[in-house]
Amino acid sequence: MFTATLIAAGRLARGDISRAIDALAEAGCRPAQGAWLDEGDAADIVFAAEPEAARAALGGAAGIDVVVQPSLDRAKKLLVADMDSTMITVECIDELADYAGIKAEIAAVTEAAMRGELDFAAALDARVALLRDLAASAIDRCRAERVRLMPGARLLVRTMTAHGARAVLVSGGFTVFAEPVAAEIGFDVAIANSLGIVGGRLDGTVGRPIVDAATKLRTIDAERIALGLEVAETLAVGDGANDIPMIQAAGLGVAYHAKPKTAAAAAARIDHSDLTALLWAQGYARASWVDA
């Protein structure tokens, strides 16, 4: 059996559920009746066949995010997540570049890299080289003034870990941001790149090996094996092209407000909702959410 979860917090109507059931029936999916997870926010429809046809049939619902997946192992035991523009609202390197007066130049390269148009490692080296001689004190200022958690990030991670899951933050950004972000949200561990700092200033280098798409893929595979989990018990979420391998390796791989290449590669995508959508997708109603 499969489950289609419709998500539109505060905006989901019974008519939306009825239309989705009709669309699934027309696609040959053999749906049952829908059931609220939280009335007005999210609902499940269980169906018997043709998950790809279900995704196609439900993908055009205006303003509604839809996650289609097998009903078994829906509540995941491992979360591996990207940081920039996924667990936080900004790209840290772009914001750090603003303190050097070159945000527009850096941000253009970041956008191209996240769209998969540039080699990730080469683009990272080139951007960090432009930050050479920036005072390291700008890192603390940037973290305090610019870095904000993505809505729903704490709820997602803390609810999952409270129910026994492991949460890993793996970022192509930097440990100076990833480690405090991970601690604030509630991740078990953070993996990211190291910025070279000499004499209180950035030296324009990135430590090796660089955390890239291959690192993210190795991380989800290694964590899953270490925990003795099946692929179906894992969840990965990200927005950029360097997240595609880990998204495709997960039982539920989610493109979150993602770049086009990433959205096209993922079996599930969240375009309208915040990260709490991934709690409803796992079958967690509000009453079971944790933020402590």
Image (cartoon, rainbow, N blue to C red):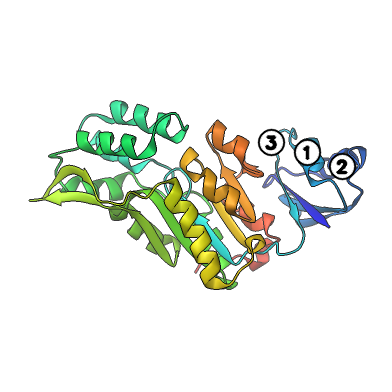
Q: Secondary structure at mark 3?
A: loop
Q: Residue at x 44, y 57 (%)?
A: 169
Q: Is residue 180 left or right of residue 207?
A: right
Q: Quadrant of residue 53?
A: top right
N-term mark: 1 or 3? 1
Q: Is residue 9 left or right of residue 143?
A: right
Can residue 290 be seen in this snapshot?
A: no
| Kind of residue at disc 2 | Leu
**What numbered label is drawn on residue 63?**
3
Residue 244: x and y in percent read 53, 43
For the residues marked 3 and 2, what is the alpha-carbon distance in whole angstroms?
A: 18 Å
Q: Residue at x 54, y 53 (%)?
A: 152
Please tell me how crowded label 3 is: few (under 14), some (14-19), or many (20+) other residues with Cα within 10 Å.
few
Percent across and percent down for residue 158 are: 52, 65
| Whether residue 275 is situated above or below residue 94 in the rendered picture | below
Q: Which mark is residue 58?
A: 1
Query: Which one is earlier in the sequence, the residue at label 2 or at label 1?
Result: 2
Q: Is residue 287 left or right of residue 29?
A: left
Quarter in which the N terminus is drawn:
bottom right
Residue 35, image quadrant: bottom right
Residue 119: image tag:
none
Q: Which residue is mark 2?
A: 24
